């Protein structure tokens, strides 16, 4: 596929326009909870981290050092990944029938799926896997046809990068093994080449293993509890997880993903069949996990990233009614996504108090400015929050100040590792929000509790958040 030819021009114009739009939007939108957390990885470079392997932090380190540590620099990597991932999806669909129109419409469907418009703007571990999964699939297909040492080395590198991105990347080995068995390439399993691949992948994830050894395997323990945390099946959580996925990926495109999985599984096209094996393993794992704990919508993003475009391709081969449905689904998604982007940039939709779409991403620069105005002595005083979601934003937006920020809770997490000094004995200025609010006198042991004046974060004459600053004199721990 030569993208420089005229038939691919419309596709290139589209993804270039979308990438430029995201770059223009990036500096005007505050960082979200997880997004800020992973930028903090870059500010605290390490072999690995409590929550995830290190590649997201290493990537942010590179890009924030090139483009600055502000919102723009924090988002360049995700925007580039969205651009390149679109090319991979286009290549996947184009290679089926060599029809650029089908491939372009499949990419349109991807961008009409709501969550991807966020994940191609905010760098997450999942975003990194978008960049790796299709090259992995293409490499396995090429390797099965041409058993060359170079392909085995490339496979090892890609698997190693995936392992540095997210722990669930271990699932990638399952469909690859099944594919070789189905293709009756049994000689692969006792070839030195497969051991070389495994060695390369293991060597690349040594930092993760070494970090876990140093930290009592806390990251692996956290992830096992985080994904499947409860002993019994939680049906309410399960249906909540499914509902969240339907809403996050566009209710009208959601069923196309499962249609695409079904059709790919019975396809004679090796690439689509291998993709179906990947998809089946991924969706089965996350569906199983959601039986025990509410699964966040982005956990299954890889599945929908692959199969919404594939499902779109198969719908394009269908009846006129199917095509009408597809046009509506894509149009609906693109219109709503465009409105969402416009709202992020121009903030024109008035919503009732505390129901703003911006409640997680707006006002933290003002919050930290007013909180730091209360700090007189950085040696004796510090800022504090009561929840990790607040800590990620507080630490990020506090980077212009010399005060310390502490997360005061009873949960063991990455913030405990980053805190080099104990908060005990300090005068802590707690930042309470409308959404995370504690009565500090009942929460913490203090010599005295001194409330300060509340203030509102206001947008379009409506309250986005209400902030309460409270000093805990001589903090001595939680009650």
Image (tube, rainbow, N blue to C red):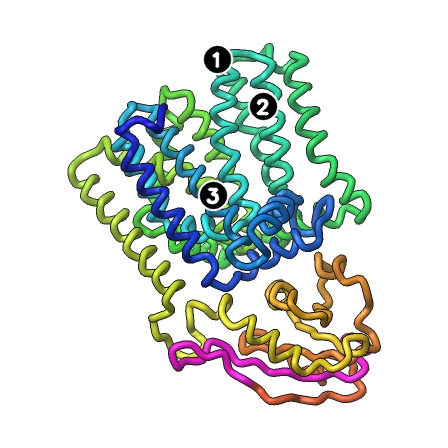
The picture places residue 305, in percent across and down from the top left corner, at 42, 41
Instruction: Give the residue pinned by disc 3.
Output: 80
10 Å crowding of disc 2: few (<14), some (14-19), many (20+): some
Q: Is residue 354 above or below residue 232?
A: below
| Local secondary structure at mark 2 | helix
10 Å crowding of disc 1: few (<14), some (14-19), many (20+): few
| Majority secondary structure in the magenta region | strand
What span is in magenta?
455-479
Instruction: Give the residue pinned by disc 2.
Output: 154
The reply to whether the magenta stretch includes residue 478 is yes
Q: Is residue 119 above or below residue 71?
A: above
Instruction: Give the residue pinned by disc 1.
Output: 145
The picture places residue 373, in percent across and down from the top left corner, at 65, 81
> In the picture provided, is 285 more to the left or to the right than 197?
left
Q: Nearer the viewer, residue 53 or 293?
A: 53
Evaluate if marks 1 and 2 touch, with contact meaning CB atoms under 8 Å apart: no
| Local secondary structure at mark 3 | helix
Q: Nearer the viewer, residue 63 or 308?
A: 63
Q: CA distance from mark 3 to mark 1?
A: 31 Å
The picture places residue 297, in percent across and down from the top left corner, at 48, 52
User: Counting residues from the N terminus, which is met first, the one under dot 1 or under dot 2?
Assistant: 1
The picture places residue 191, in percent across and down from the top left corner, at 65, 12
> In the picture provided, is 69 more to the left or to the right than 377?
left
Residue sitting at 54 percent across and 53 percent down? 73
Residue sitting at 53 percent across and 81 percent down? 466
| Local secondary structure at mark 1 | helix
User: Comparing marks 2 and 3, which lies closer to the viewer?
Assistant: 3
Q: CA distance from mark 1 to mark 2?
A: 15 Å
Q: Is residue 173 visible?
A: yes
* Number of marks in the rendered image: 3
Q: Is residue 245 visible?
A: no
């Amino acid at each position: 596929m030569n993208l420089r030819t005229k038939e691919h021009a419309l596709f290139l114009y589209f993804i270039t326009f979308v990438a430029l739009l995201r770059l223009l939007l990036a500096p005007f939108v505050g960082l979200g909870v997880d997004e800020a957390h992973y930028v903090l990885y870059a500010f605290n470079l390490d072999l690995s981290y409590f929550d995830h392997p290190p590649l997201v932090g290493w990537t942010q380190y590179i890009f924030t050092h090139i483009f600055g540590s502000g919102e723009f620099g924090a988002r360049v990597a995700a925007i580039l990944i969205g651009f390149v991932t679109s090319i991979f999806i286009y290549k996947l669909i184009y290679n089926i029938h060599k029809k650029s129109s089908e491939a372009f419409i499949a990419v349109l469907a991807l961008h009409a799926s709501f969550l991807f418009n966020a994940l191609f703007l905010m760098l997450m571990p999942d975003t990194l896997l978008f960049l790796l999964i299709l090259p992995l699939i293409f490499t396995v297909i090429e390797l099965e046809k041409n058993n060359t040492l170079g392909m085995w080395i490339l496979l090892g590198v890609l698997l190693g990068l995936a392992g540095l991105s997210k722990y669930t990347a271990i699932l990638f080995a399952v469909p690859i093994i099944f594919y070789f068995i189905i293709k009756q390439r049994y000689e692969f399993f006792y070839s030195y080449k497969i051991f070389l691949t495994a060695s390369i992948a293991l060597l690349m994830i040594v930092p993760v293993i070494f970090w876990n050894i140093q930290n009592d395997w806390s990251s692996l323990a956290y992830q096992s509890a985080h994904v499947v945390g409860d002993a019994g099946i939680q049906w309410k959580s399960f249906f909540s997880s499914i509902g969240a996925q339907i809403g996050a990926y566009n209710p009208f495109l959601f069923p196309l993903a499962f249609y695409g999985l079904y059709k790919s599984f019975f396809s004679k096209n090796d690439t689509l069949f291998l993709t179906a094996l990947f998809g089946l393993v991924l969706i089965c794992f996350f569906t199983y996990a959601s039986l025990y704990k509410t699964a966040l919508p982005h956990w299954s993003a890889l599945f929908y990233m692959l199969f919404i475009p594939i499902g779109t391709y198969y719908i394009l081969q269908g009846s006129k009614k199917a095509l009408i449905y597809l046009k509506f689904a894509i149009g609906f998604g693109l219109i709503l996504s465009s409105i969402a982007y416009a709202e992020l940039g121009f903030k024109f939709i008035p919503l009732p108090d505390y129901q703003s779409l911006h409640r997680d991403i707006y006002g933290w620069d003002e919050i930290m400015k007013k909180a730091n105005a209360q700090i007189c002595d950085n040696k004796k005083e510090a800022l504090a929050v009561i929840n990790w979601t607040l800590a990620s934003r507080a630490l990020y937006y506090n980077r212009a100040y010399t005060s310390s920020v502490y997360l005061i809770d009873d949960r063991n997490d990455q913030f405990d590792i980053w805190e080099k000094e104990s908060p005990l004995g300090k005068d802590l200025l707690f930042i309470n929000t409308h959404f995370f609010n504690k009565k500090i006198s009942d929460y913490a042991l203090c010599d005295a509790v001194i409330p300060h004046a509340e203030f509102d974060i206001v947008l379009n004459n409506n309250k986005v958040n209400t902030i309460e600053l409270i000093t805990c004199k001589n903090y001595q721990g939680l009650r």
